[in-house]
Image (cartoon, grey):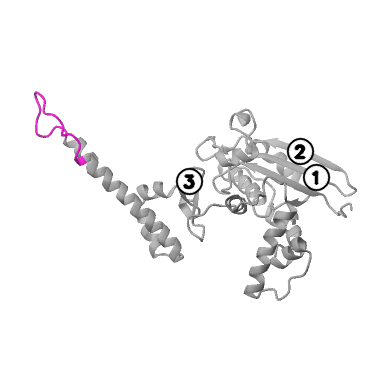
């Protein structure tokens, strides 16, 4: 069915240096503009991700590059978002917006890039994305095809779930659904009858605590997932701001989160003490001709401070 449009509808998608709206940038932007009557116009930009505050090209997160395959070298000769901002606004200006999960990520990222141009390049851009209509196709999909246990039971097992929301019925239904999934996707290499592989496939983010305040990166290092230290390893935070761990312990966090931070703190403290003891038991500084009692104290003090 063709769209019934009174004004253009602009579908858009973004690839970026990472998933942090505040600190990442657009590297690819595609617009597909559908006009009333069905005419279609397409425009795609490759964008050099620019840190306007520090006047340098922004790095691409390796996990993001693994998904979209775009490297910093691919973007070296591309325009910055500031260079294309006027053209982007011209494409958007008379349209409503549409995308897949775009209201959650793509739209905020686009708005952030526009605000950066306004702030750091002192340019007025005649657009306010907050006043534009946004059609998120993913939300329509989820609303029309519910991802509930009852819906899954009907889809994979072929019958209605009786006594839904009773703990025993729901638990047994979940077991039946998993077996139904293995039958339906037999032969698909992503779904194997193996608990280890099923666990890895079904877990989107590897968390340290159940609330997800700490997650594991590609090197299996615990990383803070929120707030001012988002994206930093817990080790980096501890050695730069150890009081942050006390703030966690006294804050409004789950006891499990506090425990995981406390375990990491204990680990880091033990490592620090072990390193200090190793330095203390190291061979003493040899006395040489012309040695004075004050020589070497600077190094010793710096070791103590470390």
Q: Which segment is the magenta one? A: 280-296
Q: Residue 66: where, in percent of width, then height?
A: 60, 38
Residue 143 vs 284, above or below: the answer is below
Q: Do the numbered discs 1 and 2 sit on residues whose CB atoms are within 8 Å?
A: yes
Q: Please tell me whether mark 1 sits on a helix, a strand or a loop.
A: strand
- Give the mark, 3 or 1, whose residue is nearer the N terminus: 1
Can residue 229 be seen in this snapshot?
yes
Residue 295 vs 151, above or below: the answer is above
Task: Quickly name the residue at label 3.
Answer: 220
Few, some or many residues within 10 Å of mark 3 (<14, 14–19, 20+): few
Q: CA distance from mark 1 to mark 2?
A: 8 Å
Q: Residue 25: where, in percent of width, then height?
A: 59, 42
Q: 14 or 191, which lies in front?
A: 191
Viewed as shown, does residue 274 lie left or right of 81? left
Residue 129 in magenta stretch: no
Task: Quickly name the residue at label 1.
Answer: 33
Residue 164 vs 31, above or below: the answer is below
Name which residue lies at 51% across and 60% down: 210
Q: Please tell me whether mark 3 sits on a helix, a strand or a loop.
A: loop
Disc 3 versus disc 2: nearer the observer: 3
- Give the mark, 1 or 2, whose residue is nearer the N terminus: 1
Q: Please tell me whether mark 2 sits on a helix, a strand or a loop.
A: strand
Name which residue lies at 56% across and 48% down: 20
Name which residue lies at 86% across and 53% down: 3
Q: Which mark is residue 147?
A: none
Q: Quadrant of the C terminus?
A: top left
Viewed as shown, does residue 122 lie left or right of 2? left
């Amino acid at each position: 069915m063709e769209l019934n449009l009174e004004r253009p509808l602009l579908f858009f998608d973004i690839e970026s240096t990472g998933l942090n709206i505040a600190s990442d940038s657009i590297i690819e932007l595609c617009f597909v503009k559908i006009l009333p009557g069905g005419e279609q116009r397409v425009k795609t930009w490759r964008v050099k991700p620019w840190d306007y505050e520090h006047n340098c090209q922004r790095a691409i997160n390796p996990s993001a590059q693994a998904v979209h395959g775009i490297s910093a070298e691919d973007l070296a000769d591309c325009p910055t978002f500031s260079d294309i901002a006027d053209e982007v606004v011209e494409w958007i200006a008379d349209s409503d917006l549409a995308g897949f999960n775009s209201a959650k990520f793509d739209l905020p990222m686009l708005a952030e890039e526009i605000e950066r141009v306004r702030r750091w390049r002192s340019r007025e851009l005649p657009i306010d994305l907050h006043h534009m209509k946004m059609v998120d196709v993913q939300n329509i999909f989820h609303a029309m095809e519910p991802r509930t246990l009852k819906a899954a039971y009907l889809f994979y097992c072929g019958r209605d779930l009786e006594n839904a929301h009773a703990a025993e019925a729901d638990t047994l239904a979940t077991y039946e659904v998993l077996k139904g999934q293995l039958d339906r996707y037999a032969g698909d290499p992503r779904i194997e009858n193996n608990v280890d592989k099923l666990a890895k496939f079904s877990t989107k983010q590897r968390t340290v605590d159940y609330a997800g305040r700490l997650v594991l990166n590609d090197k299996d290092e615990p990383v803070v997932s929120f707030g001012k230290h988002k994206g930093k390893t817990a080790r980096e935070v501890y050695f730069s701001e150890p009081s942050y761990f006390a703030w966690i312990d006294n804050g409004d966090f789950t006891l499990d989160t506090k425990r995981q931070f406390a375990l990491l703190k204990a680990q880091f403290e033990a490592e620090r003490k072990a390193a200090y003891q190793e330095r203390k038991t190291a061979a003493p500084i040899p006395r040489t001709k012309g040695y004075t009692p004050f020589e070497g104290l600077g190094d010793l003090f710096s070791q103590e401070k470390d």
